[in-house]
Amino acid sequence: MKLTRTGKIFVAVVAVIVLILGYFTVFSGDDAPPDLGLDRPAKIPAPFKFPLTGAQAQQFDVRAHGNREKLDVCQFFTHYATNRGIPIQFEALIPDDARQSPYFYTDPRTGREFWPAYYVPATSTGVSEAQAIASGDTEKLEGCAQDANGAPVPILIGFARGQKPTGNLIRVNGVIWWDSLQLNPRQRITAAGAETADAPVVLAGEAQRISALALQRPAFKERVLNFAFRHGKVALRVSRVEFASDQTRVWVELINKTATPLPAWSGVNQASLRQDGGPTLTVGLSSDEGGPTADDTDTLPDEDLPPRGAGNLSGYLIFPEVDPGRTVFLNLPEVDADLDNGVAPVTIRLDPDLNVDVS
């Protein structure tokens, strides 16, 4: 059957409507319908400019966070066309060997680096699942994210110069931007002569390193401290306290101010929390079988402090859960082993009215 000019226009209009309806079944809200010009990168939503800074970063975070619950790995693949250009927030795992991947690409014009990564579901097993997928295990990977041979296809995340966080596990605020074969037409042929698949490309507006522990056991209350002091040869920073349903986490950083290594900090084993009217809770101990242990990932390592310029030690002090609606006292031992007389010189009082909800 040959379509008339009017019929062709009608079919085109219906196609556009279907695409737009597809968009609204994936994400809803105030975001504009996606840019469907698939032969070019998606537009960054107005009024934002990447990389995000200041108030724009906060505003974009609000919009992206609103789409988190609707996001899964197939939204990057099956629904790529209708999700382009929409603010999204997700976690991803960048493998240790990502730079050696045939998907890795540096744009010679802009200097942006595009790193292969794997989507991390926000579940208690999400990180371990992503690690397995990165190693080639597709048992729990949706078919939408596999190539013709059943191998995992990564998501490429594009970072501006100096924007990529350190570490493997990151949280990204950005947009689904383009596809890898149009970004890098030479991608198809690897050094071994094998073909790679077309991967979705996310442009990062903002990215930050995230703790696996914080992702698996999310906090519902938080207290930002940014408290720092120096005693003797060591400086200590206490950034925040996170209140989760089954544990309390305190993020600390130790800085050696000398040119030689120093003994491990006793606080790794001797820091304590005291709830008003309750018992003293020791770091690393658990109130029940399912609670925190000293072996949890991202805990502050019990090891010597590296010399100045060789990196700092950072991580969580992990305690049993407490009630963030009541006053808590955090007791920290002496940070310089030479001055340690068994008396905790630092007590931080955490009044409940300064704790904030975590969305």
Image (cartoon, rainbow, N blue to C red):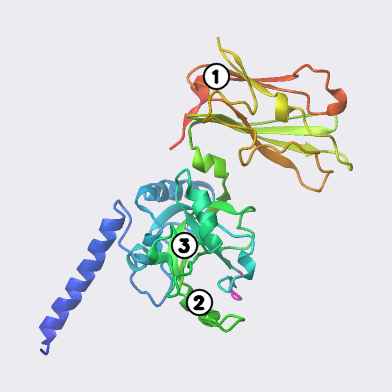
Q: Residues within 10 Å of mark 1 (few under 14, many from 20)?
A: some
Along the line of sight, the residue nearer the viewer: 168 or 19: 168
Q: Residues within 10 Å of mark 2 (few under 14, many from 20)?
A: some
Is residue 109 covered in magenta? yes
Q: Is residue 94 left or right of residue 145?
A: right
The main secondary structure of the magenta stretch is loop
Along the line of sight, the residue nearer the viewer: 298 or 236: 298
The residue identified by callout 3 is 138
The residue identified by callout 2 is 196
Q: Position of residue 280 (x, y in %)?
A: 62, 16
Regarding mark 1 in the picture, which secondary structure is present there?
loop
Tell me the amino acid under the disc marked 2: Thr
Residue under the point 50% across and 41% down? 216
Is residue 276 covered in magenta? no
Does label 3 or label 2 sit earlier along the sequence? 3
Along the line of sight, the residue nearer the viewer: 5 or 200: 200
Tell me the amino acid under the disc marked 3: Thr
Numbered range of the magenta stretch: 107-111
Tell me how far mark 2 sits from mark 1, CA to CA.
55 Å
Instruction: Quadrant for residue 108, please give it.
Output: bottom right
Q: Position of residue 171 (x, y in %)?
A: 52, 51
Regarding mark 3 in the picture, which secondary structure is present there?
loop
Q: Is residue 215 left or right of residue 311?
A: left
Q: Position of residue 100 (x, y in %)?
A: 64, 70
User: Residue placed farthest to the top in the image?
Assistant: 277
Circle nearer the viewer, 2 or 1: 2
Regarding mark 2 in the picture, which secondary structure is present there?
loop
Residue under the point 65% across and 26% down? 283
Instruction: Quadrant for residue 123, please give it.
Output: top left
Tell me how far mark 1 sits from mark 3, CA to CA.
47 Å
The residue identified by callout 1 is 351
Placement of the N terminus among the 4 image quadrants: bottom left
